[in-house]
Amino acid sequence: MKYLLVALVLLIALQIWRSNRRKAAVPPPSAKRQLREPEDMVTCAHCGVHLPSSDALVNADQHSYCSREHQNLGPK
């Protein structure tokens, strides 16, 4: 009877240990990569490439450009 009780305690301890190990292996949901908000896209007035509005260079005439070179060349 004593050995049966010891075996039962060991079995329960093993189950608890396995359960905790599985939980530690799964990353928590907050560890997932956070996605950025979508951004407005604009078209370069010179070459027509689409780029995020935060990366665009805007002239006084409100034309958007992808680079200084295209800004200097002006719209097509």
Image (cartoon, rainbow, N blue to C red):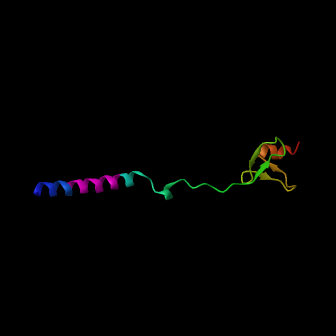
Task: Name the side, left or right, on which 3 lies relative to 49.
Answer: left
User: Does the segment drawn in magenta span residue 2?
Assistant: no
Q: Nearer the viewer, residue 63 or 10?
A: 10
Task: Name the side, left or right, on which 27 lies relative to 52.
Answer: left
Residue 13 point in image, percent of width and height: 24, 56
Give me the residue at 85% from left, 56% from top.
Answer: 60
Quarter of the view holding residue 34? bottom right
Residue 66 point in image, percent of width and height: 76, 46
Q: Nearer the viewer, residue 71 or 15?
A: 15
Residue 25 point in image, percent of width and height: 39, 51
Give me the residue at 29% from left, 57% from top.
Answer: 16
Q: In this rendering, is residue 6 above or below 75?
A: below
Quadrant of the snapshot with the C terminus: top right
Task: Name the side, left or right, on which 14 lies relative to 31.
Answer: left
Magenta region: 10-21
Residue 45 point in image, percent of width and height: 84, 46
**Which secondary structure type mostly characterizes the magenta part of the structure?**
helix
Q: Nearer the viewer, residue 7 or 26?
A: 7
Q: Residue furthest left?
A: 2
Q: Nearer the viewer, residue 50 or 45?
A: 50
User: Does the segment drawn in magenta span residue 11?
Assistant: yes
Give me the residue at 46% from left, 57% from top.
Answer: 28
Quarter of the view holding residue 40? bottom right
Task: Name the side, left or right, on which 74 lies relative to 54.
Answer: right
Q: Residue furthest front?
A: 1
Give me the residue at 37% from left, 52% from top.
Answer: 22
Quadrant of the snapshot with the N terminus: bottom left
Instruction: Count how many numbered circles sit on residues in the image.
Output: 0
